[in-house]
Amino acid sequence: MELDFHDLYREHYNTVYFTALKIIKDHGLAEDVLQESFLKAYHHLGEIKDEVKTAAWLRTITSRTAIDVLRREKKEVLLPTDEVPMPIQRDLSHVSEVELAYEQKLLEDKIKRKVKALSPKLRMVFQLNYYEQLKEKEIAHKLHLSPAAVKSRLHRAKKSIQQEAVANA
């Protein structure tokens, strides 16, 4: 049996996309899952024995890929404290450690939400840099981008997060 990948893509695009969207609930991430799923399908195209089961096979690949993406997304967002601007310097001698810890937790939560709200392009570069500790050149290689594009995206992500931290101080 010989399947043409382009026909497979056209025929099953909607099925794969909506399967991903049902699990991910985010259009941008669903597109990423769609691409990743079709890439996996392309690499294993020769393993399909029954064309009738192709849609089920693709839904399985998509579901598993979407779940993997959700797991990656759930990784706790931690920012190095030296990267988070302290927006207002004030006398804190009268504030207890508990209050300080609470304020720090609130700020971290706001920053986590801001990271999650970044566009997928910015978020991916930011996460690879901060959570996986990859250098800009490594990120560029991994994402097939120019180092300048990575540097620009990383700068925009940091700026956006810092603006949120300052605005909510």
Image (cartoon, grey):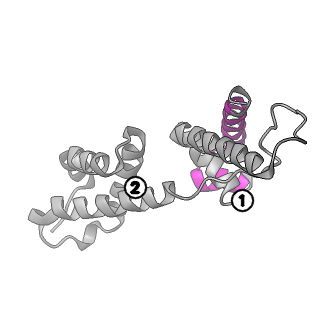
Residue 161 falls in image quadrant: top right
Residue 6 percent coordinates (x, y) = 26, 49
- 58 left or right of 37 in image: left
Callout 2 crowding tier (Cα within 10 Å): few <14, some 14–19, many ≥20: some
Q: Is residue 102 above or below residue 70?
A: above
* Image point (30%, 58%), residue name: 62
Task: Tell me where residue 104 appears, x and y as whole percent.
Answer: 72, 46
The image's mark for residue 9 is none
Q: Horizontal placement of 111 versus 86: left or right? A: left
The reply to whether the magenta stretch includes residue 148 is yes
Outermost residue to the left? 52
**Dominant SS in magenta:** helix
Residue that badge 1 annotates: 133
Helix, strand or loop at mark 1: loop
What amino acid is at disc 1? Gln
Look at discs 1 and 2 and give the one toward the viewer. Answer: 1
Numbered disc 2: secondary structure:
helix
Q: Quadrant of the C terminus?
A: top right
Is residue 106 shown left or right of residue 60? Answer: right
**Magenta span includes 138:** yes
Range of the magenta residues? 137-164
Q: CA distance from mark 1 to mark 2?
A: 23 Å
- Nearest to the observer: residue 121 or residue 49: 121
What quarter of the picture does the N terminus occupy?
Answer: bottom left
**What residue lies at 83% left-to-right and 48% top-to-bottom?**
82
Rendered residue at 90%/35% (across/down) = 91
Q: Mark 2 sits on what residue?
A: 36
Q: Give the camera-side residue of 1 and 112.
A: 112
Q: Position of residue 79 (x, y in %)?
A: 71, 50
Mark 1, other Cα within 10 Å: few <14 / some 14–19 / many ≥20: few
Rendered image quadrant of residue 157? top right
Q: Is residue 168 above or below residue 81?
A: above
